[in-house]
Amino acid sequence: MILIDVGNTNIVFAASANNLLKKIKRIKTNDGKKKLKNLINKIIIDFASTNKLDNHNVAIISSVVPNLNLLIKNILKKHSIKGYVITSKDILPFLRIKYNLKEIGADRLANSIAIIKNKITNSIVIDFGTATTFEVIKNKIFLGGIIFPGINLSKETLVKEASLLKNTEITKTNKIVANNTQKSIQSGFYWGYLLAINGLIKNISIENKFKPKIILTGGLANIFKNDIKPKPIIKPNLTLEGLQIIGSSHYAKKK
């Protein structure tokens, strides 16, 4: 079984073999359709030959970029693989949801399913993607969440709109108050987002009267992990784990 998570910034692929994630690869979503077509085709050929692949005829797709779905499914079809784009109906056997099912991203639901499968009843899942999202789960019920601009997206917008600022890597600074522009940007994004995240965790916990485990996923999770309170669990492949659970339960025998 091939797993594909189509995000606004990256498309992430994994092969599910013996219920383990293998050969995780990522490519840029905005590389252009011609280049994407070639890259995806090469990845599918490679993954389809994976030893002990759980199902050679099925690919499970989570997508927040609908205009790429047909392209991906057509490439899969060339290799006799049926692509299934998951929807809310695939989630309902695993998860009670108090959210508009027509609006919630499949990746956020896949994250939640993976957490519940790991027997974590109460949690806040924070995904550092194009958007920084919070999923709030209490007593195995998806209560809803928060969406605000992702760190890299905010940084790129700032640099684009402010001609005197240069792009710089996001990293932790030892001091909040910096004495040059580069460190000022780094400090602003690190401490600004950290204080926002910790504040939101605290207030979400108070509002919902629970003590959740904090789960971090996405590209920048490791940068923030030591300062987020309470101490978080890092799950870099959470969405893929959720897709694997959905695929194994619903599509494992389909051809």
Image: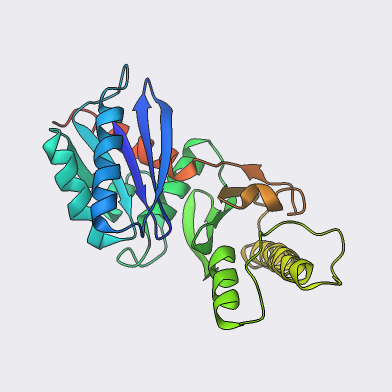
Above-or-below relation of 15 to 147: above
Is 75 in front, or is 164?
Answer: 164
Q: In the image, what residue occupies the spot 33% across and 43% down?
A: 4
Q: Where is the N terminus found, in terms of image quarters?
A: top left
**Res 159 → quadrant:** bottom right
Asked if one can make out residue 92 in the rendered structure from this viewpoint, the answer is no
Q: Where is the C terminus found, in terms of image quarters?
A: top left
| Extreme residue in the top direction | 52
Is 155 in front, or is 199?
Answer: 155
Q: Position of residue 190 (x, y in %)?
A: 72, 63
Q: Position of residue 218 (x, y in %)?
A: 54, 50
**Res 67 → quadrant:** bottom left
Q: In the image, what residue occupies the spot 70% across and 49% down?
A: 225
Asked if residue 208 lies left or right of residue 119, the reply is right
The colour scheme applied to this rendered structure is rainbow
Asked if residue 101 lies left or right of residue 129, the reply is left
Q: In the image, what residue occupies the spot 64% across and 65% down?
A: 204
Q: Position of residue 119 (x, y in %)?
A: 53, 36
Above-or-below relation of 162 to 11: below
